[in-house]
Amino acid sequence: MIALNKDDLTKKEAGSNGIAGRVRQANQARILAAAEQVFAQRGFAGATMAEIAAAADLPKANLHYYFGTKEALYLAVLEDILALWLDATDGIRADRHPAVALGGYIRAKMAHSRTRPLASKVFANELLHGAPHIRPYLALELRRRVEDKVPVIEGWIAQGLMDRVDAKHLFFSLWAMTQTYADFDVQIRAVLGVATLDEKDFSIATETVIRLILKGCGIALPNTEDH
Amino acid sequence: MIALNKDDLTKKEAGSNGIAGRVRQANQARILAAAEQVFAQRGFAGATMAEIAAAADLPKANLHYYFGTKEALYLAVLEDILALWLDATDGIRADRHPAVALGGYIRAKMAHSRTRPLASKVFANELLHGAPHIRPYLALELRRRVEDKVPVIEGWIAQGLMDRVDAKHLFFSLWAMTQTYADFDVQIRAVLGVATLDEKDFSIATETVIRLILKGCGIALPNTEDH
DNA sequence: GTCTATATTCAGATAGAC
DNA sequence: GTCTATCTGAATATAGAC
């Protein structure tokens, strides 16, 4: 399919944004997906451009052409992940009952661990080694996001909807309990004696975490069943 | 202090186990400590023998003389950590009240995160990348250890001392909640807005986790205050 | 825009002097 | 037993043909 029709060429700057732009987008997406996989498995230092190129089924020089350096490619992967990361907290709002909001948050984070384990691992690896590439982001964006949610939790406490629990440490526990199923899945699989974590394993995990957290925070089920 | 007195030489095989043996032990310990630090910060792939040597304040060739290869040194570090790891579960026994046993376990794991964060990070990094060096250990020793503790939890449930909670997933949550304070401390420090986690931070963290877990499992305080 | 062939850098490992 | 100097292999990056 090398031939291209007229419609494709009607786009402005067709030479770089038309067909070629599509090839570019497709190649970049393939490289990013391959890079996420290799960085998740090997870490930043352990990953090689050759392995990423092989996973993307493209020549090595292609990666440098699109992303310049290994570090720039890594940053591009991290950026995708970070955008994804913050969205999950959206459901934590003062107008919701804490059982619905926190239960939904746990479900979302667990679904995340199941569907995007590689993203979680890349992020975990970055944190584990002191977050050299995203420290500013943590201190600004993540911190602000948590600061936004703390008053919501404290509002629920003031309304008597839950116990007096330190909101920030509650988040640390939530992140840890849910992300461990992606980051440290080898350990979980070894203890459970299974080759892979299936839907049922995640279902039990999700219900266990929700139960521990909701009951642990003294949150009763809401009257209306609107979740 | 090159000269050595007669007493030192009276030891059997003095040449390799006497003074020299002590130097050997001291050097090996220094190398292991330096290696733990560098492996924790950089991961296995990111760590270099040169950096470990610099941290140990010894020439690079010395490391190869004592441990042969980088991988052998890494395995020696992991072995030390693994021995330490299993001991913490010792307090989980059927003859204890779950509030005492699990509360004590959480305290022990939290103390661990505070005093040996580097060990925790080396272990976390190994798990994160699929545990290539310790997979057999996980499937045998760790799994057996958990299998030993599951009946203890289920005994407490049968006695009505706690809710019906999946014992294995309870362990996954406990490990995650406590180790996150060592492994992902950058994230926690960023959100809390502090440069280092001090005793007070760990105190709040410990009480929060104990509260969440004990209440989350429906565990009431025991009658006798023997902890 | 794409890719082969190569330059450069750097880390793991060791030979051999002390 | 210890360490300097060096070898060897591998990985990032790029020059230049197509």
Image (cartoon, coloured by chain):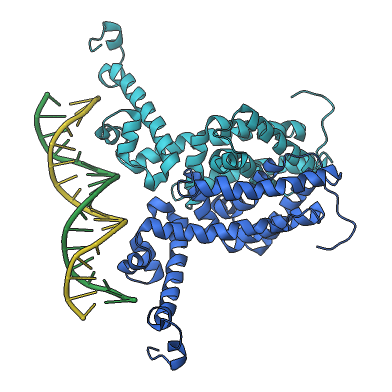
Chain colours: A blue, B cyan, C green, D yellow
Position in image of residue A76 (x %, y %):
46, 60
Task: Determine the image quadrant of residue B156.
Answer: top right
Q: Residue furthest front?
A: A12
User: Which residue shows up at 43% across the image and 93% down it?
Assistant: A5
Work out whether residue B139 can be spotted: no
Is B62 situated left or right of B89 in this image? left
Position in image of residue B19 (x %, y %):
29, 16
Position in image of residue A68 (x %, y %):
34, 62
Is A113 situated left or right of B61 in this image? right
Work out whether residue B77 can be spotted: yes
Is A93 situated left or right of A37 in this image? right
User: Which residue shows up at 69% across the image and 54% down it?
Assistant: A205
Exactly how many numbered labels are in the figure? 0
Q: Residue furthest top?
A: B6
Q: Nearer the viewer, residue D14 or B204?
A: D14
Quadrant containing the C terminus of chain B in the rendered view: top right
Task: Determine the image quadrant of residue B159.
Answer: top right
User: Which residue shows up at 41% across the image and 40% down it?
Assistant: B39
Quadrant containing the N terminus of chain B in the rendered view: top left
Position in image of residue A80 (x %, y %):
52, 61
Is A166 situated left or right of D4 in this image? right
